[in-house]
Image (cartoon, helix red, strand yellow):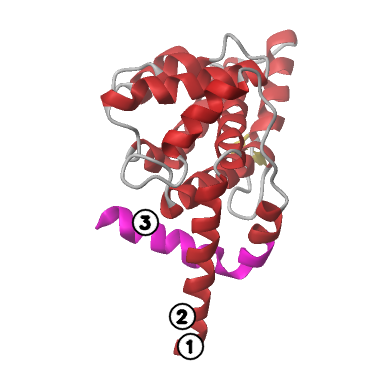
Amino acid sequence: MLRTHYFLRCTLALMSTISTVIAEQDSVKPIEIKHANSCETLFAMIDGVPIFGITDRKYGRLSITKKNLLGMLNGDEKHPGYAYNGKLYTVEELTKIEKELETGISTYQERSAFKHCIEEVKADFEKTIAPLLTDAPPESLKNVALKLVKASCELHNTPNSFMLTWADAEKGNEFVLFRKELVTMHQVRTFIVDQINFLEFMLSNCPKSYKLYKAMIHKKLADRKARK
């Protein structure tokens, strides 16, 4: 019930821009990846498959999560930025500030305030990604998810990505590792980018799920219009 309520809230929030979302997704093409045959087999196991695969609602959650992570990274109406020294900054901007603090002269107060800012970004990330963890595959299919993460990392030339550790973590231990292992803004920013790349990888290679998602959105819009 809680998952249903969450999705309905997200769907209503997207109604005002749904035509743009659909137009963007219409232009999505499958990504050319190495070891394409093995990945095609993996995607065939989950694309449009009920329960443990990527369905219309799960596709919607992936798309919304990607949009929110991009907002954290670059800023948008929902993500105006994170407070530091009386101003709001995006994750990209904070990563540059961190480098300046490391190479220049900074006070204890500045470093302490920046550390607090990192924790705020990490908390926002956890809140943003948490709905996807409720859709995490059972242990019997975890190997499929790990192979897809590896394929995404290979595609984007990130062989040392924390995504690999994250995907292989014991269920329920993901955020513990995240908080423990990623301690700088640069590390958090890199992980957010890797997550965005993986989500795009999934969205671009699940055409059946996209069609189901698009049909669901059109039906909701038609139903809403009929009630007016």
Residue at mark 1 = 226
Q: Answer whether residue 182 is visible to the viewer in this image.
A: no
C-beta proximity under 8 Å, tags 3 and 2: no
In the picture, measured across the screen, residue 60 lies left or right of residue 35, that is: left
- The amino acid type, in three-letter code, at marker 1 is Ala
Majority secondary structure of magenta residues: helix
In the picture, measured across the screen, residue 58 lies left or right of residue 100, that is: left
Residue 10 in magenta stretch:
yes
Question: Residue at (68%, 15%) from the top-left corner?
Answer: 157
Q: Position of residue 190 (x, y in %)?
A: 61, 22
Disc 3 versus disc 2: distance between alpha carbons?
A: 19 Å
Residue at mark 3 = 6
How many residues crowd mark 2 within 10 Å: few (<14), some (14–19), many (20+)? few
Disc 3 versus disc 1: distance between alpha carbons?
A: 23 Å
- Circle nearer the viewer, 3 or 2: 2
Q: Position of residue 206 (x, y in %)?
A: 54, 42
